[in-house]
Amino acid sequence: MRNRRKMNEPKAAKQKVIDGCKEKACSDKEVKTMEACFGYLNCDCLMHIFSFLPIRDRVNVELVCKQWYSAGRELWKSFKQLDVCRSKWQFKNLKKFKRVEMTMFKTVLERCGRYLTEIDFTHLSTIDEEIYFEYTIDDDKMHEDDDKSFEGIMALASNCTNIEKLSLSSTVVNCNDQHLLDIFKTNKKIRFLNLIGYGIHGTCFNGLSAHVIETLLMQYCCVQSKRLCKLLERCVNLNILSLNCTRSFNTKNFGDILRCVSLVNIKSLKEFRFVSYYDNNRETHLYTSFHVNTNFKNLIAIQIMEAMEDSMNDLLIALGKHCTNLRRANFSDCVGVTDDILINITTLPKLEVLCIDRMEHVTDRSLICLSEHLKILKCSDSQISDTGVITLLNKSQNIEILNLSMCKNISKRSVDYAICVTKHRTNNIILNFCVDHYYGEKCNVKDKSPLFRLHYELTAKEEQLHTGRGCSYIYPFFKCEKNLLQKSCTFNIDSNTEKTFGSYAYYHFFMCFCQRIPNDENN
């Protein structure tokens, strides 16, 4: 046995030399070998790699070879959501983006249209939203169908049959009543509908499965009020309703819509938003047609802004009486509301968010009654004082955002007390405290708390002057507030995980609070 081992040792040594020579010989061709091996990956590996590619590249990889073609086609079956997000389409310049490239759009829909369950063509940049607003607010332009291409919406109607969530914007895809009717007829599972900036008659609603609709958002749309009311009457399972009306509606149209919302027996309604563009020439008693009754007992969120007439008083009283589950409310710019009326809202036991900016007659008397569950309070340009702020901070230990800008009765005393209170917080919730820029410069806060952030409003010129000062303790409030709301309202529609505020409409609702926030480029 020993002799055999000795005889085999030279052979083993020779084999090691040969293997070493092979490794050296292959070292120069290592890159080529790796490239060659990539072509032998199975379909599962290729599909995983292709899933990270932009949409336009997913189409192009099908032209490489038959294996890549089959892997690319198989990948489209798992493609459930289509939007105009820049990261997915790889647009070079989103600011100049006006329409989806129709050739690529139709090609994509031919591959994945029957598998799609969600289509969102409303994802635009901030600047695009401004351009869009100026465009859609002009009702004459909205009704012009000349020089418009309907190829995109026609491709969508002919290829998609399983849509559950549909969001369309006129700045992305053109369509009219007939095109929407074709989509609604072939997609009977639509439970989320969001239309932005369309001028339609409303005949398309006849093909919509209204009993399936749970969320209805219509923003800056010109639609006949009678047909919209008929749709609302059929939406018996509606949970979220948001109507952002244009100037084409007269007082009678507004009244008909509000009266319909009041009379329709939608006991499942949880969130309601109604915004109209107020005109001084209109009749003042607009909200007299809106009667809150027991049908609104499950209401969680409501937003009614810029209501100038006295009818808001009766509305707020009724809300406090029937909507005891209300958690989020936005009544900004309702300047006629006083403490005697607002106290019906502030005494609600579950209220978490209250936005009452520019309500000049509001004082401490109504705000000190707020719930201990309060998280966000925006009461800029009000009569609240240091005494009210101190009482509020003692009672509401969970408050995260407190906007007191343009409140003339606020002094350094409120800031010092807020710092003292947050030092003893055991819930680790950071308090974001907003004051005016002029006051923020004079605060000279020496004491600090890890759970306190002081912010102040900042104009474009002032931000340029303050850039580079290294002031890490005082921040521009508007930017911070927008980031906080976006972060706290982050949502994933298809996820079953617990969310901070629960649904897409919560995010939509809170983003309305930020509609006056300056754009990053304008700051």
Image (spheres, rainbow, N blue to C red):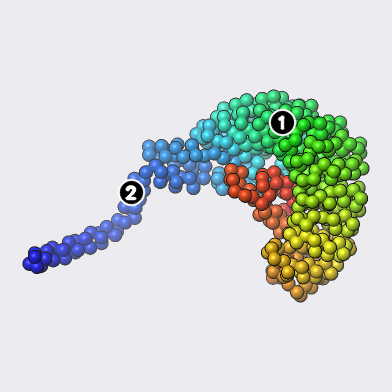
Query: Which residue is painted at 39% across and 42% down in the image?
Result: 43
- Residue hosting label 2: 36
Q: What number is the disc on residue 235?
A: 1
Q: How many marks?
A: 2
> Could you say where residue 8 lies in the image, as x and y percent from the top left?
11, 64
Report whether residue 384 is seen: yes
Query: Which residue is painted at 72% across and 39% down in the image?
Result: 240
The vertical placement of 213 against 10, above or below, is above
In this view of the protein, which residue sits in the foreground, 18 or 338? 338
The vertical placement of 452 against 368, above or below, is below
In this view of the protein, which residue sits in the foreground, 147 or 388? 388
Looking at the rendered image, the disc whose residue lies closer to the viewer, 2 or 1, is 1
> Could you say where residue 122 lies in the image, as x and y percent from the top left?
65, 41
Amino acid carrying mark 2 in the image: Ala
Secondary structure beneath dot 1 equals loop
Query: Which residue is painted at 77% across and 50% down in the image?
Result: 350
Q: Quadrant of the N terminus?
A: bottom left
